[in-house]
Image: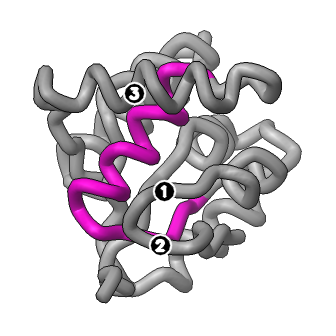
Amino acid sequence: MPSVAKALCDTGPLVAMADRFDALHGKCVEAFSQFSGNLVTTWPVLTEAFYFLDDPYSRGFLWEFIVRPGVQVADIPSDDLVRIRTLMTQYATLPMDFADASLVVAAERLNLRRVFTLDRRNFLLYRPRNVAAFDVFP
């Protein structure tokens, strides 16, 4: 049975929570404050988030969020790379990027079904092996 105490965290909410001027800042902060479990992300997601955050305050917030830890970082074992490549090929028409594929693989490995994302369209289409569909929030 998939864990409900943990949820994956995509790039969008991390950027929105870190950037107080982001249009979705309040919505993501509220969703995070109402979630009582633990968030899990991957290194590719953090790489994307840091890329989109260009001011020191926002980057500082993200660093604090990682080390607090507001979010746990799941490793990507080299065994997962074949599956990531397969997913990116399968969803090439969307297209699926490396960060999203890493989250799908993390969901499969950690048996997670909830995803904190602003990319509802794609995450409602992705089909991980462990569940019929993702439960997306906010």
| Residue at 47 percent of width and 52 percent of height | 9
Q: Is residue 110 magenta?
A: yes
Question: How far across and down, in percent of the image, does residue 6 sit?
Answer: 33, 74
| Residue depicted at 60% across the width and 11% down the height | 54
Q: Please report the bounds of the magenta region as a residue range.
A: 97-116
How far, Cα to Cα, is label 3 from label 1? Answer: 11 Å
Q: Which residue is mark 3?
A: 84
Which residue is depicted at the point 13% across and 21% down? Answer: 78
**Count of numbered marks:** 3
- The three-letter code of the residue at mark 3 reads Ile
Residue receiving disc 1: 128
The quadrant the N terminus occupies is bottom left
Q: Which residue is mark 2?
A: 131
Instruction: Judge the density around disc 1: few (<14), some (14-19), many (≥20) Cα neighbours within 10 Å.
Output: many
| Of the pair 32 and 74, the residue shown nearer to us | 74
Tell me if label 2 and label 1 are in contact, CB under 8 Å.
yes
Amino acid identity at mark 1 = Pro
- Disc 1 is placed on an element classified as loop
Residue placed most toward the observer, 36 or 101 = 101
Q: Between 78 and 27, which is closer to the camera in this rendering?
A: 78
Residue 22 image offset from top left, x and y in percent: 79, 39
Picture quadrant of residue 45: top left
Quarter of the C terminus within the rendering: bottom right
Label 3: few (<14), some (14–19) or many (≥20) C-alpha neighbours in 10 Å: many
